Amino acid sequence: VSDVYHKPITNSLNNLITSGEITIDHLFDVRLLIEPHIAMEAALHAKDEDIEKLEDLITDSSSHQDDPILLKRNNLKFHLLLAKASGNPVLSLLLESVIELLAKTTLDFLDLSLERHFFQVHEGIFQVIAQRKPEEAKRLIREDILDTKKRIEEFRGK
């Protein structure tokens, strides 16, 4: 899915965030609705090239464990690659918009130990995707999203 396609959605959502009509909680609610399905679909339908891209991303993160910026970027990219691996371009388009907005609203949320933690979680998710275990992928991605939401709330003092 090209950047051109998700930009109108992102721009509309961004305006709603700026006006206060959409919150980070709303974005996480959307993630909880679509990402477990995305993970299941990726486990069922990922092509060899999708698995290779995910593996390359995991390898890149593994060799840059002291770079929180790269780890965060790869963390976000991991979710987008899963969406593409699901085979449903509409899910990719929606998730790209949500992830882009979350990235903008959490720019100040950067901690090396947390990024390493998220990397380890993603390694596990990757393994079950590669092993074609959709229910396990669904469970792990849901746990990942809830954990991330909790950590952001703690960081923001909510």
Image (cartoon, rainbow, N blue to C red):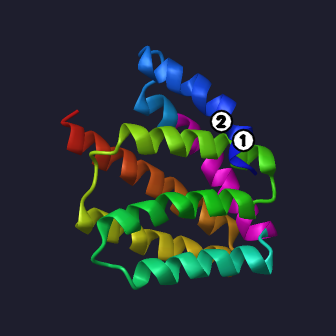
User: Residue beneath label 1, please?
Assistant: 4
Residue drawn at 69 percent across, 66 percent down: 134
User: Is 18 situated above or below 68?
Assistant: above
Instruction: Report the quarter where the C terminus lies.
Output: top left
Label 2, residues with CA under 10 Å away: few <14, some 14-19, many ≥20: some
Question: How far across and down, in percent of the image, does residue 108 sit?
Answer: 27, 45
Amino acid bearing label 1: Val
- Compared across the picture, whether 76 is left or right of 151 comes to right
- Magenta span: 29-45
User: Residue beneath label 2, please?
Assistant: 7
User: Is 24 situated above or below 126?
Assistant: above
Give the camera-side residue of 140 and 103. Answer: 103
Separation of residues labelled 2 and 1 (CA atoms): 6 Å
| Residue 77 in sight in this render | yes
Callout 1: helix, strand or loop? Answer: helix
Question: How far across and down, in percent of the image, does residue 32 sit?
Answer: 55, 43
Question: How far across and down, in percent of the image, does residue 16 sit?
Answer: 51, 19
Question: How far across and down, in percent of the image, does residue 24 sit?
Answer: 42, 32
User: Is 68 situated above or below 63?
Assistant: above
Label 1, residues with CA under 10 Å away: few <14, some 14-19, many ≥20: few
Residue drawn at 74 percent across, 49 percent down: 2
Amino acid bearing label 2: Lys
In which image quadrant can residue 13 be found?
Answer: top right
Give the camera-side residue of 98 and 44. Answer: 98
Q: How many marks?
A: 2
Give the camera-side residue of 92 and 36. Answer: 92
Callout 2: helix, strand or loop? Answer: helix
Evaluate if marks 2 and 1 touch, with contact meaning CB atoms under 8 Å apart: yes
Residue drawn at 22 percent across, 38 percent down: 156
In which image quadrant can residue 114 be found?
Answer: bottom left
